[in-house]
Image: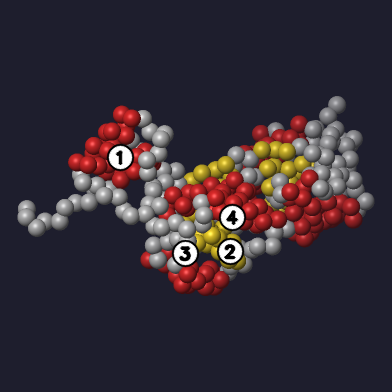
Amino acid sequence: MAGQARHKVTIGEIAAEAGVSNATVSKVLNGRSDVSAATRERVQEIMDRHHYQRRRPRRRGGIVDLVMNELDSLWSIEIIRGAQEALAEAGVSMVLSAVHGSSTGTGEWLEQIAGRRSDGAILVVSDLTPRQRARLAALKVPFVLVDPVGSADAGVPTIGATNWAGAISAVDHLIGLGHRRIAHLAGPRQLLCSRARADGYRAAMERAELPVPDGWLRFGEFNDASGRRQLTDLLDETAAAGGLPPTAVFAASDLQAFGAYTALRERGLRIPQDISIVGFDDVPVTRWSDPMLTTVRQPLQDMAAMAARTLLRLVDGEEVDLPRVELSTRLVQRESTGPVPPGPDTPQ
């Protein structure tokens, strides 16, 4: 009918008609070489037939916000380094903000991003409220989540790590050394990564048919003071009940593991001769500790770099096929773990 508005075909409709993914269509649009000639020709023919005009990409060279709960931890430094290097390679500047876990701080940052007209945001914060997400949408600011507290909405790009599998590798390592009494110093209960590591600990213990006594899985915070307090309380309560102490401890972060170091040394206990310790993260200082810490390596810089590159794709108008990506963790064995000390449960 004359005067009727023409339907604007979407990338998704082009992909469906061509029998390819949205990402493949985006590659054709961006002139990427990793698409076969036949596929490129088919996609291009469909776009021409529908008179498809891609949205003009937002100009790069501006700024991207990296928003974090805190900036003063070794974990945060690795995230900052990974994001900054990836953005610098693309010629994009980074503005760093800390909200310290408060919804008020996040609200202030949202107004700041509106004022400086940021191209996008990498969020390493607690879950955003629906109101905050709506504000980002209204500002037309694409964003990527790194290691979120809870499960992200469908379609929200999220970069994490294999926390559950990493925890299993830590506990399996200790079991392989003969340990049967293994405790877990968990992170904050509300964090998805903490719960995944705790679930991995439980799964490994259950698979080995090993008990988890009351109080041997203790939630806390990702810092050394919490690790020291968690292990001190666990040892005190176990002794008061007349029970045997753990011979090994799996900490949900390297900082908690270092707090456990302090708690053990205050009691005159040796690592690993009396108690073995495994951490999680593999921040650089683990290689300088005494003894050097056995830990699960979480690729923090790689996670941040992938988040930055994913965000730049969104800024350029591309679509992301995999909204949730988990990078692999792996156990790094050093000096803080050893065979189970002689005792009632030493394998014969």
Query: According to the image, label 4 marks what residue?
Result: 84
Colour mapping: secondary structure
Mark pair 4, 1: CA separation: 33 Å
Viewer-nearest of discs 4 and 1: 4
Q: Which mark is residue 15?
A: 1
- Quick one: label 4, few (<14), some, or many (20+) residues within 10 Å? many
Residues at discs 2 and 4 in contact (Cβ within 8 Å):
no
- Please state which amino acid type lies under the numbered disc 2: Leu
Instruction: Say few, some or many: other residues with alpha carbon within 10 Å of mark 2 (under 14 / 14 to 19 / 20 or more).
Output: few
Secondary structure state at the residue bearing disc 1: helix
Disc with the residue nearer the chain's start (2 vs 1):
1
Query: Which of the 4 quarters of the picture holds residue 333?
Result: top right
Q: Quick check: 18 left or right of 67?
A: left
- Mark whose residue sits in front, 3 or 1: 3
Indicate the quadrant where residue 38 lies: top left
Q: Report the Cα–Cα distance between label 3 and label 4.
A: 15 Å
Residue where numbered disc 3 is placed? 118
Secondary structure beneath label 3: loop
Foreground disc of the pair 2, 4: 4
Report, in whole angstroms, how far the alpha carbon at label 2 lies from the one at label 4.
10 Å
Query: Disc 4 residue type?
Result: Gln
Crowd class of label 3 (few under 14; some 14 to 19; many from 20; radius 10 Å) = many
User: Residue 239: image x %, image y %?
Assistant: 86, 52
